[in-house]
Image (cartoon, rainbow, N blue to C red):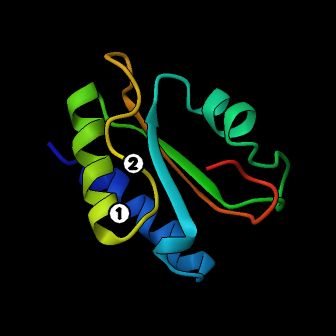
Amino acid sequence: MINNTIVNDINKHANDEGSGYPNWYCGIATDPIQRLFSEHNVPKGEGQAWWIKGNAGSEQNARDTEDYLLQLGFDGGAGGGDYASTHVYAYKKILGVTQE
């Protein structure tokens, strides 16, 4: 089931930034902080990067929510994560900095 709260929160955050969904990457993870900052290299710190995360409550909800965001035009790829991936995350891609 799509988690509409997460979809609305991510859409609002991306729209507030203003560059368009294709400039954003979304995914699912067990530990979104690890995934964002260590694996995708999103800069830490206030005002350094646009990112957001939310707990979808189950792996299936996270996958359904990710699939929906991908259909809206966010960058990313379905099929990642594992059975414990209940979090959905998104970040604004930064050329030469973030790892997609």
Find numbered disc 2 in the image and state the secondary structure of the residue it sits on. loop
Residue topped by disc 2: 77
| x then y, percent, for residue 3 | 25, 47
Amino acid on which the number 2 mark rests in the picture: Gly
Question: Can residue 2 be seen in this snapshot?
Answer: yes
Picture residue at 47% right of the left edge, 22% below the top: 30
Find numbered disc 1 in the image and state the secondary structure of the residue it sits on. helix
Amino acid on which the number 1 mark rests in the picture: Asn
- Using the numbered discs, state the Cα–Cα distance from disc 1 to disc 2 in whole angstroms: 20 Å
Looking at the image, which is closer to me, 82 or 33? 82
Query: Split into 4 quadrants, where in the image is the N terminus?
Result: top left
Looking at the image, which is closer to me, 51 or 74? 74
Left or right: residue 96 compared with residue 92: right
Q: Is residue 79 above or below residue 97?
A: above
Q: Is residue 18 above or below residue 57?
A: below
Q: Is residue 10 above or below residue 78?
A: below
Residue 23 is labelled as none
Which image quadrant is residue 38 in?
A: top right
Picture residue at 33% right of the left edge, 48% below the top: 66
Q: Is residue 12 above or below residue 63?
A: below
Residue topped by disc 1: 8
| x then y, percent, for residue 79 | 32, 36
Does the CB distance between marks 1 and 2 fall below 8 Å? no
Picture residue at 68% right of the left edge, 42% below the top: 40
| x then y, percent, for residue 17 | 62, 76
Label 1 or label 2, whichever comes before in sequence order: 1
